[in-house]
């Protein structure tokens, strides 16, 4: 008997999806619907950002610019970066899966402030509409908006900044909502050390969102003042400093990579024990390492600026501090591997993506110290090595974690099962395509190929051809995955309440859950990772 | 907590008066040349005003330790960004 049946909740209804019509979505206060709206929106931007990436790869098939102008190439990599970062990777897991799952994980009926939650989504929507509006004079600065170029280009910098400002505001409100929800709405008996690890990671993420995001908002206001009023914060001829912009930008944008990766780590911490049928190893270490990563992540922003003319002492201190991030990160990886040790491992699609996360993230993580060390950074800065490192951590890490989460919770969110065979084919294509695309970039980067150029010298041709072929395979894998999602939604088999025999509270609700999740607020008497130690 | 009693209204008016006074002081001090100290004084007065708003208008005064924690932690991060940036700009 499944946990859902135990709690007397039938899993054969449409649950929170019962109500139809656009109003039922636009004005909903249900965290699950709001989460679903975030998911749909972010997946659309993921696909759009992917199209820009494919255009870049197409251009790089030949050493000479063949299909697009240099300006178009600059626009494409800016839009690829801006969309992927601000409209997909940052909001997808926290606002999408987080919204859907946090109250369910806690045994709550909803988030603490449902109206604020809806406002967050619509502020996010306003943000992406403004960003789309900026395409009338598309940005060509790269997603980092560096001055002095961003202060004088004719592109719609102020418009895109406003869009990102709104996205940031939405992010702050979501983070605030989650912090209060986690503090105040835990089910009876749900002590801090009985929280699912996904909640710990979301808590750490939310703190970063609330503390760091205002800084980038203010930075964009300063940039707007620079462009519109000629103030000169970042203009040396008026007593300003362009490197100051980089300080402000990275004070937000480095911690925000942990907004991207921590929730994915939370998903991996949920998936690994379920498909190993073993209790999670080192619960406390994994939980507290999330907080440690969030804290240390604030101390290392200067490592993006080693070649920007920063003071030697600052370079040295930021380099030294950077290595500390590796410690809590490695703690998580060791504990996941220890959980796998002697487990009864099965390779369903969520587990395949979770294991892929670990494999790729180790490569991404271990290439970090090369960039954190001052001597090698000078050689590797702005080469394809950085592009490869970033994509191994953010796509190999965050996106694979996101895919693991989508496959794991798809039955809960939709009430339908996915076709497992198709899911595995998609995974194989994604895994192969990803490594072909990005591993070759490590090689091109160490051989000196600079990033952000539409043209390159012929000696890098082979790597670029392999990378472009890989990107096509990766795109095919993602298309197969999306097709599987659509088919699953249309005619997937009915999902039971708990298809994976999981112990966290969301599986006690029906699939899909009712509007207020549980008929009765659950009582919690144990941690949720007792796999292999009782009937689970 | 009662926000509308005569006592609390008196406090709000008092805080409002203090904020206006401090604003006038800020403007007056800007006419006196104290060198670098002008910035320090302006920041000090601004901090005092922000504290008054947080304590009384935002009711931090009567809040629990947890809320105080969330109010104070960002000050650490503010100090961090100022320190980290000065570490660069003052030592180049």
Image (cartoon, coloured by chain):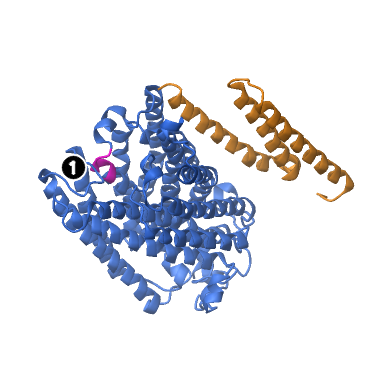
User: What residue lies at 25% left-to-right and 35% top-to-bottom?
Assistant: A380
The secondary element bearing badge 1 is classed as helix
Q: Is residue A105 above or below residue A141?
A: below
In terms of image quadrants, where is residue A519?
Answer: bottom right
The chain drawn orange is chain what?
B
Q: Residue B46 is drawn in which quadrant?
A: top right
Task: Tell me if residue A400 can be seen.
Answer: yes
Image mark 1: chain: A
Q: Is residue A384 magenta?
A: yes
Residue A276, given in percent of the width and then of the height, sits at 37, 55
> Residue A422: x, y in percent?
28, 69
Nearest to the observer: residue A94 or residue A385: A385
Give the residues drawn in magenta, as a range: A382-387
Residue for point 23% across, 51% down: A70
Quarter of the image holding residue A255?
top left
| Residue A486 relative to residue B30: left or right | left
Label 1 packing within 10 angstroms: few (<14), some (14-19), many (20+): some
A87 vs A522, nearest the viewer:
A87
Question: Which residue is drawn at the image coordinates 51% and 77% (left, top)?
Answer: A14
- The residue located at (43%, 66%) in the rendering is A40
Q: Main secondary structure of the magenta part?
A: helix
Q: Is residue A370 left or right of residue B42?
A: left
Is residue A90 positioned above or below B27 on the image? below
């Amino acid at each position: 008997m499944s946990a859902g049946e135990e709690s007397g909740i039938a899993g054969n209804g449409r649950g929170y999806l019962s109500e139809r019509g656009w109003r039922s979505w636009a004005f909903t206060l249900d965290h699950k619907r709001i989460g679903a709206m975030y998911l749909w929106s972010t997946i659309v931007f993921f696909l759009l950002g992917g199209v820009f990436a494919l255009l870049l790869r197409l251009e790089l098939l030949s050493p000479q610019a063949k299909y697009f102008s240099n300006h178009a190439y600059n626009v494409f990599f800016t839009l690829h970066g801006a969309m992927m970062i601000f409209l997909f990777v940052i909001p997808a897991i926290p606002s999408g899966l987080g919204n859907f799952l946090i109250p369910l994980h806690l045994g709550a009926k909803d988030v603490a402030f449902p109206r604020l939650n809806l406002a967050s989504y619509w502020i996010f929507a306003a943000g992406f509409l403004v960003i789309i509006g900026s395409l009338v004079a598309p940005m060509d600065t790269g997603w980092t908006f560096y001055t002095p170029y961003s202060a004088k280009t004719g592109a719609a910098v102020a418009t895109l900044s406003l869009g990102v400002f709104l996205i940031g505001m939405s992010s702050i409100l979501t983070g605030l909502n989650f912090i209060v929800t986690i503090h105040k709405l835990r089910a009876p008996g749900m002590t801090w050390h009985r929280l699912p690890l996904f909640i710990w990671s979301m808590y750490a993420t939310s703190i970063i969102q609330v503390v760091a995001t205002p800084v980038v908002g203010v930075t964009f206001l300063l940039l707007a003042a620079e462009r519109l009023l000629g103030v000169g914060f970042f203009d040396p001829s008026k007593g300003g400093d362009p490197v100051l912009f980089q300080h402000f930008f990275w004070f937000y944008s480095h911690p925000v990579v942990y907004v991207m990766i921590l929730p994915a780590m939370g998903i991996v911490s949920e998936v690994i024990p379920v498909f190993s049928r073993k209790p999670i190893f080192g619960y406390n270490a994994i939980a507290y390492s999330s907080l440690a990563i969030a804290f240390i992540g604030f101390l290392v922003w200067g490592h993006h600026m080693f070649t920007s003319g920063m003071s030697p002492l600052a370079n040295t201190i930021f380099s030294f501090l950077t290595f500390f991030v590796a410690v809590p990160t490695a703690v998580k990886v060791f504990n996941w591997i220890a959980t796998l040790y002697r487990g009864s491992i099965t390779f369903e699609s969520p587990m395949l993506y979770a294991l892929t996360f670990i494999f790729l993230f180790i490569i991404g993580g271990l290439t970090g110290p090369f960039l954190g060390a001052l001597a090698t950074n000078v050689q590797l800065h702005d080469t394809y090595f950085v592009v490869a490192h970033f994509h191994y951590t953010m796509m190999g890490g965050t996106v694979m974690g996101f895919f693991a989460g989508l496959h794991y919770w798809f039955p809960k969110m939709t009430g339908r099962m996915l076709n497992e065979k198709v899911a595995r084919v998609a995974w194989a294509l994604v895994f192969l395509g990803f490594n072909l695309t990005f591993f070759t970039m490590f090689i091109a980067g160490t051989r000196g190929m600079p990033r952000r150029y539409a043209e390159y010298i012929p000696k890098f041709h082979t790597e670029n051809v392999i990378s472009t072929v890989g990107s096509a395979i990766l795109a095919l894998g993602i298309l197969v995955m999306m097709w599987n999602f659509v088919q699953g939604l249309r005619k997937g088999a009915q999902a039971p309440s708990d298809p994976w025999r999981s112990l966290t509270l969301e599986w006690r609700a029906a699939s899909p859950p009712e509007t207020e999740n549980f008929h009765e607020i659950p009582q919690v008497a144990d941690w949720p990772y007792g796999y292999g130690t009782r009937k689970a | 907590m009662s926000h509308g009693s005569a006592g609390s209204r008196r406090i709000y008016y008092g805080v409002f008066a203090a904020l206006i006074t401090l604003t006038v002081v800020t403007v007056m001090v800007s006419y006196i040349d104290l060198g670098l100290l002008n910035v320090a004084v302006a920041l000090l007065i601004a901090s005092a005003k922000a504290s008054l708003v947080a304590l009384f208008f935002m009711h931090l005064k009567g809040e629990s330790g947890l809320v105080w924690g969330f109010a104070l932690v960002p000050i650490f991060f503010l100090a961090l960004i100022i320190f980290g940036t000065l570490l660069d700009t003052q030592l180049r």
